[in-house]
């Protein structure tokens, strides 16, 4: 199985940028579809973006389309989420996820999860 560890979160002003990283160990991430989700207190974990194993398929929640980019570096066994033009409503704990067999926008589409990294956008 694969282990995922996120990093790169922090405090940023509205309009700023952050790049989140999700480092994988245990297995080659190239064998997995990968995704980012986010969650705020008291709410469900919501889909942000996914990238299929081959990279042919990508998908973004409409609220981040054009501002966020999901990418992967298989040589580094790492997935990234580049976040530009950040807004206060992007504030959340961000989680990366991976699955060998499925890709989708639901939490249940992914078997492996990281521990999350906090992103706070101030107005």
Image (tube, rainbow, N blue to C red):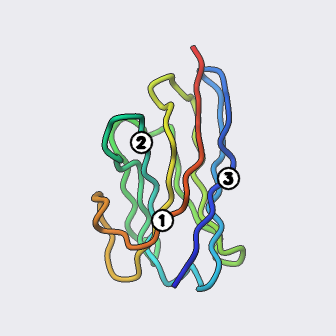
Labels 3 and 2 touching (C-beta < 8 A): no
Q: Which of the two discs, 1 and 2, labels the residue nearer the N terminus? A: 2
Asked if 100 appears above or below 61 in the picture, the reply is below
Q: Residues within 10 Å of mark 1 (few under 14, many from 20)?
A: many
- Circle 1 is placed at which residue position? 113
Residue 26 placement: quadrant? bottom right
Give the mark count.
Answer: 3
Asked if 123 appears above or below 27 in the picture, the reply is above
Who's the residue at 65% across and 21% down the image? 13
Q: Which of the two discs, 3 and 1, labels the residue nearer the N terminus? A: 3
How far, Cα to Cα, is label 1 from label 2? Answer: 13 Å
Q: Element type at marker 3?
A: strand
Q: Element type at marker 1?
A: strand
Tell me residue 7's x, y (percent).
67, 52
Q: Is residue 55 left or right of residue 71?
A: left
Q: Is residue 107 left or right of residue 3?
A: left
Residue 54 tag number = none
Asked if 93 appears above or below 122 in the picture, the reply is below
- Circle 2 is placed at which residue position? 39
How far, Cα to Cα, is label 3 from label 2? Answer: 16 Å
Who's the residue at 34% across and 82% down the image? 101
């Amino acid at each position: 199985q694969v282990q995922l560890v996120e990093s790169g979160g922090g405090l940023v002003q509205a309009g700023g940028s952050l790049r989140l990283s999700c480092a994988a160990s245990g297995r080659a991430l190239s064998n997995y579809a990968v995704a980012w989700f986010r969650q705020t207190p008291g709410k469900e974990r919501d889909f942000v973006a996914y990238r299929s194993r081959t990279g042919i398929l990508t998908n973004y929640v409409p609220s981040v389309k054009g501002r966020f980019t999901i990418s992967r570096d298989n040589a580094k066994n790492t997935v990234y989420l580049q976040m530009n033009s950040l807004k206060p409503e992007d504030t959340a704990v961000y989680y990366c996820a991976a699955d060998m067999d499925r890709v989708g926008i639901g939490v249940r589409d992914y078997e492996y999860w990281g521990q999350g990294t906090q992103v706070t956008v101030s107005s």
